[in-house]
Amino acid sequence: MNFVAWMIVACEVAFWVVIILGFIARYLLRKERLGFLLLALTPIIDLILLIITGLDLYRGATATSAHALSGVYIGVSIVFGKSIIAWADERFRYYIVKQGDKPLKCYGYKYARHYLKSWLKHVLAYAIGIGCLFGLIYIVQNPARTEALTSTIHWWSRILGIDLLITIAYFIWPKKAPV
């Protein structure tokens, strides 16, 4: 595994470590400001990954799928980061601290609307991630060295289209609650 791939793994681990430490500070240590500060570090992790990826390519590396994945990671993390933290916060409060209500699952058209909102976020994550990938392609200025980035743009476009079809399907065949 190359350096950028390891950095993606390190950033993902750092993301979750910072979130968990933020929750521990907030709920167990009762340090609201420290908890907020730790949770606010998550975008810094994305920035570090973007800088490392850009520098690696700028210094002459040929783009790999790991370089491309960093663009995807950044887009997804920026757009979904807040909702991921809220999702984890709700579960931490209920399962660890034993506060708050049990996380609810939604079904039917409510679920379809929720999935549509997620798809719209996916579109935004796609725009940010593709922007990062095009930025890296522009920095390198060598199509032979950026083929993995271009390939990722194509497959992510297909995934976005498939996700749209799934979104539409939830309106046609709403998700049913278990009996």
Image: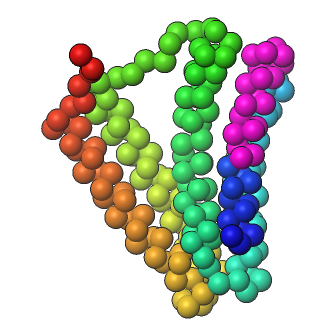
Q: Is residue 159 left or right of residue 11?
A: left
Image mark count: 0
Q: Where is residue 166 drawn, in percent x and y?
A: 27, 47
Q: Is residue 74 left or right of residue 37?
A: left
- 12 or 161: nearer the eye? 12
- 52 above or below 84? below
> Which quarter of the figure has residue 81?
top right
Dominant secondary structure of the residues highlighted in magenta in the image: helix
Q: Where is residue 53 drawn, in percent x and y?
A: 70, 69
- 42 above or below 11? above
> Which quarter of the figure has residue 160?
bottom left
Q: Is residue 63 magenta?
A: no
Identify the image's colour scheme: rainbow, by chain, secondary structure or one colour: rainbow
Quadrant for the C terminus, please. top left
Q: Is residue 160 visible?
A: yes
Q: Which residue lies at the image location 59% right of the left edge and 56% below the top edge?
A: 73
Q: Where is residue 72 drawn, in percent x and y?
A: 54, 60
Q: Is residue 106 left or right of residue 77?
A: left
Q: Which residues are magenta?
A: 13-31
Q: Which residue lies at the image location 57% right of the left edge and 83% below the top edge?
A: 146
Q: Spot the residue most to the left.
A: 172
- 96 above or below 58? above
- 76 or 95: nearer the eye? 95
> Which quarter of the figure has residue 15?
top right
